[in-house]
Image: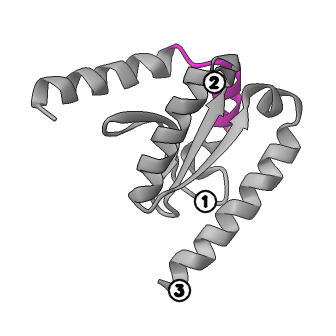
Amino acid sequence: MNLKMNLQLLQFAKSMRHAATDAENLLWQILRAKRFMNLKFRRQYVIQPYIVDFYCHEVGLVIKLDGGQHNTEDGRAYDVERTQFLEALGLSVVRYWNSDVLGRTDGVLEDLWRICSTLKLFNLRT
């Protein structure tokens, strides 16, 4: 990927941080500054050619939050392609619906805690 495209992607990711959804803002308040399991998460992080909602390098986890646009045929196809790409890099990908983050926050966090705990153990062994 050329430098111009790379800079455009980084600029777009930055703009997305300022236009976050309510679900992204809520989850970011929980994840930021190592507040969740003392893990460092980044938001709207570029993993070329994609921008992921949240990323934790320490455990190799990508978190995607989905709104209704992901529940279309094109949206699902794009999501499958992106997930396969990220998993080919050795990353784990977990997805949550925006409505679940906003309406079932405790359940989402329990699930995320379980996933991160498993990934932390796995990464200690490798």
Q: Residue at x 63, y 44 (%)?
A: 31
Residue 19 at what x, y percent from top left? 52, 13
Mark 3 secondary-structure assignment = helix
According to the picture, the residue beneath numbered tag 1 turns out to be 38
Q: Residue at x 20, y 30 (%)?
A: 6
Q: How is the image coloured?
A: one colour
Quarter holding the N terminus is top left
Residue 119 at what x, y percent from top left? 60, 68
According to the picture, the residue beneath numbered tag 3 turns out to be 125
Mark 1 secondary-structure assignment = loop
According to the picture, the residue beneath numbered tag 2 turns out to be 70
Q: Residues within 10 Å of mark 3 (few under 14, many from 20)?
A: few
**The residue positioned farthest toward the bottom in the image shown:** 125
Q: Residue at x 49, y 16 (%)?
A: 18
What is the spatial separation of the Cα atoms under label 1 and label 3, in whole angstroms?
19 Å
Start and end of the magenta stretch? Answer: 19-29
